[in-house]
Amino acid sequence: MNKYSVLKNIFGYTSFRAGQEEIIDALLSGKDALAVMPTGAGKSLCYQIPALLLPGMTVVISPLISLMKDQVNALREAGCPAAFLNSSLSSGEYSQIMGEIARGNIKLLYIAPERLEKTEMSVLAAGGNVPMIVVDEAHCVSQWGHDFRTSYLYIADFIRSPAFEKRPVTAAFTATATVKVSGDIKKLLALKNPFVVNTGFDRPNLYFEVKRPKEKTAALLDCLEKRKHSSGIVYCATRKAVEEVRELLLARGFPATRYHAGLEDSERRKNQDDFLHDRKTVMVATNAFGMGIDKSNVSYVIHYNMPKNIESYYQEAGRAGRDSSPADCVLLYSGQDVQINKYLITHTEDDAGANPQLTAYNLELLRQMTFYATTSDCLRHRLLDYFGDASPSHCGNCSNCRTGFEETDVSLEGRKIVSCVYRLKERNRGFGKMMIIDILRGSKNEKIRRMELDTLSTWGIMKDSSPHRIRAIIDHLIDEGILLLEDGEYPVVTMGRAGELLREERRLLMKLPKERKEAEAEAAGPAPQSVRQPMDEALFDKLKNLRKEIAAKEAVPVYIVFPDAALKDMCGKKPVSLVQFSGVHGVGQLKLEKYGEAFVELIQNHVKG
């Protein structure tokens, strides 16, 4: 066997994606490797193919039990001898797997980093049959990453174990890593002159959208109604929000389940299983859910609350469209999200002032995430720029690029806003954005009258401007440093570098949506990307039903049988013979033998009508 025959006969693909072949060649030649590749780029094949070609058993260090189970199920479906060791195994299952390992019958063994200190790991190392160690989700080794795990710090000692006759080749893989985190991966995993591949962070199949709705629940229901025949994830910042959103969705008839750290392990496993097997199509969850979830047919991810940083957002949003099909990533933003995240950053057990430098760093990351949520620039460009990827300033596949923006001179409006902040400062007063907007629009609410803010010279000077427009300009003024947002329990807008603007020595330009009625703006919003592509829907439904029957018999998630991308390829090619079926994307030799006749017969009957 060689890499090409393994690619086709086992995994059912005819060509490598960007970066895959180079990484495979490096590992087969004995070099360490660090691969930064976006979700859906095919990282797993980069180590699975070398593992099948190298003598002995490759050890894959993976963070979650669910990931191991899915990866091993998929490999076994493709005819690869794989196994995992974790706490979910019974003593009998554990002994059986250890026996298979001792007999040399396992090529890929998945383990959690916490098991590296267990006795059996020393036994495996002493056996001298481990040519390669793979570290998945390698960003977890860095405290500057978005999902630091102390257990990952044990990995380097395991790789250096004197029990190994020869140090195994080491490969580290991650989907999201800044330059700083990549440096930590090399150092903390003790990679030796690694071959480094960064294929870029762009996911062209993902559509990015930021909504700033008046009412989040209404916006969420609208998003889900448009995608009610699809599978997706709704992320919330807190357990309480998960419970509230899930109850709302159940009341409206959506088949939703939940996942957060406050649930019993048994319920989390059941709910995750329901989602993976499509018994429930909507998962409402905190960020405790998702890492290692290899569900390929997630066609949307909606963030009900803004995450704490761009790395977390991109990792979570990237769980959509893993099969390269079009998918939607929607963020529902409100200013309250910023306050929730500041509280989480400064009051969690891990941060809690124990590491002021890390807390300050995380607050800066939150600021950058807020800029993403409030920008009028191309959203994809903002994301890729954060990771250091060069990209066009207009992608054409995000909500900002599809909105009618025009560069507008807002110098006069900016001066009015800054003047309001200045007049408040003269009275030793300071307020947040909403109060400033109310003053500028001439609100007569009880608080404004009680504090005599309606006597300010700037009260009501922007009464004809919408709250949304004023807030957008305030955000831009803060982005430009003309105004500042002071941290605290109640953030206050204060003066920044405002002199040039007030003295009319500087113009303030920003992109704003072209003025149109709010109802028209909402109606003109783009259709979900995940439902834009024309396809033989009748055949697709029949194929999904057949896949579901097979998956139920074999007790595996449906995408383990075939991902949606394979079914869509069948809809396009309509293979009516086994030879033609072998050319379908993702059909290897074993799947051809197991499923080919059933799917070909269904397609033949459909074509005949």
Image (cartoon, helix red, strand yellow):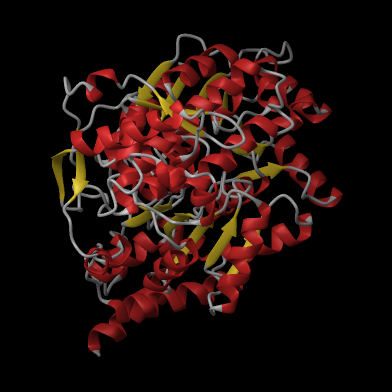
Residue 531 drawn at (x, y percent): 30, 67
Say whether residue 9 is left or right of residue 78.
left
Q: In the rendered image, which quarter is residue 25 located in?
A: top left
Whether residue 442 is visible, yes or no, is yes
Residue 572 drawn at (x, y percent): 23, 68
Camera-side residue of 386 and 198: 386
Camera-side residue of 44 and 323: 323
Quadrant location of the C terminus in the rendered image: bottom left
Residue 152 drawn at (x, y percent): 66, 25
Quadrant location of the N terminus in the rendered image: top left
Q: In the rendered image, which quarter is residue 243 located in?
A: bottom right
Camera-side residue of 235 and 123: 235
The residue positioned 31% from the left and 63% from the top of the image is 528
Whether residue 62 is visible, yes or no, is no
Q: In the rendered image, which quarter is residue 496 located in?
A: top left
Q: Is residue 398 above or below residue 392?
A: below
The residue positioned 25% from the left and 76% from the top of the image is 536
Camera-side residue of 511 and 490: 490
Q: Is residue 92 above or below residue 60?
A: below
Q: Is residue 190 above or below residue 147?
A: above
Residue 529 drawn at (x, y percent): 29, 60
The residue positioned 61% from the left and 50% from the top of the image is 286
The residue positioned 72% from the left and 10% from the top of the image is 162
Say whether residue 555 is left or right of residue 332.
right
Work out which residue is located at the far bottom of the displayed protein and give it.
Answer: 609
Say whether residue 331 is left or right of residue 258.
left
Count of labels shown?
A: 0
Q: Is residue 542 above or below residue 413?
A: below
